[in-house]
Image (cartoon, helix red, strand yellow):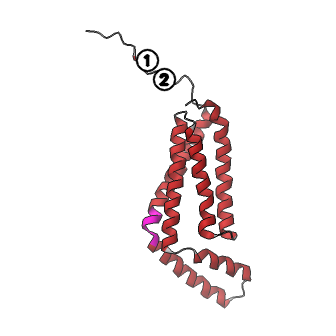
Amino acid sequence: MESNTNFDQVNPAPSIARPAFLIVLCILTFIGSSYGVYSGISGYFTADFRARVMSETQNKMDEQMSNTAQPEMLKNFMGSMFSNMSADNIRKSSLINLIANLLTLGGAVLMWGFRKSGYYLYIAGTIIWIIIPLIFFGGGLLGGISSGLYALVGIAFIIMYGVNVKYMVK
């Protein structure tokens, strides 16, 4: 017995071709956010080791700086950088970074499927990504530089994805 059901009419494929620019943006996000997820997981589970390495590095740098004349600004910068690198802060930062990268990755997956909600999910992940350094490193030089770099990349991607929102129909 032969069926007369035409499956193309039951589940029609999207009539919109995926723009090349959206493909490139999504692939870059898949790669970057997947690496961020991996880094968040590994950072969480290796926080004690990383904190110990940072402490040893701080001790060596303090010793070297005490033997030479260094500008006070450099000493303050290095001190503030290392003071926030406790195992607990590394775990918290890694966990929040993991969440931000999962949001941006999920947003890219949704945008790949032409869903506008992915764009807003991506924005939420990017906002978290920008705020993390300010929370853990404070509003000082290190927090400002880190947050600024994240903002530069994140906002550029938000704008580029924004150009493609018109193709997202769901």
User: For the residue carrying disc 2, how many other residues have a C-alpha within 10 Å: few (<14), some (14-19), or many (20+)?
Assistant: few
Q: Which residue is mark 2?
A: 13
Name the spot of residue 141 as percent of width and height, x first.
70, 70
Q: Amino acid at mark 1?
A: Asp
User: For the residue carrying disc 1, how many other residues have a C-alpha within 10 Å: few (<14), some (14-19), or many (20+)?
Assistant: few
Q: Amino acid at mark 2?
A: Ala
Using the image as rendered, state which of residue 24 and residue 119 is in the foreground: 119
Name the spot of residue 122 as percent of width and height, x first.
58, 46
Q: Earlier in the sequence, mark 1 or mark 2?
A: 1
Left or right, 87 with respect to 63, comes to left
Q: Which numbered disc covers residue 132? A: none
Question: Per the image, is 43 magenta?
Answer: yes
Q: Are marks 1 and 2 in contact (CB under 8 Å)?
A: yes
Q: Is residue 116 above or below residue 14?
A: below
Callout 2: SS: loop
Name the spot of residue 68 as percent of width and height, x first.
69, 88
> In the picture, residue 9 is in which quadrant?
top left
Question: Per the image, is 72 magenta?
Answer: no
Q: Which residues lie in the magenta part?
A: 42-47
Name the spot of residue 157 as percent of width and height, x first.
64, 46
C-alpha gap between disc 1 and disc 2: 7 Å
Q: Which residue appears farthest toward the bottom when viewing the image?
A: 67
Q: Quadrant of the N terminus?
A: top left
**Residue depicted at x 63% and y 57%:** 130
**Residue depicted at x 60% and y 36%:** 22
> In the picture, residue 163 is in which quadrant?
top right
Task: Count all numbered tags in the image, as a single digit.
Answer: 2
* Majority secondary structure in the magenta region: helix
Q: Which residue is mark 1?
A: 8
Q: Is residue 119 above or below residue 48?
A: above
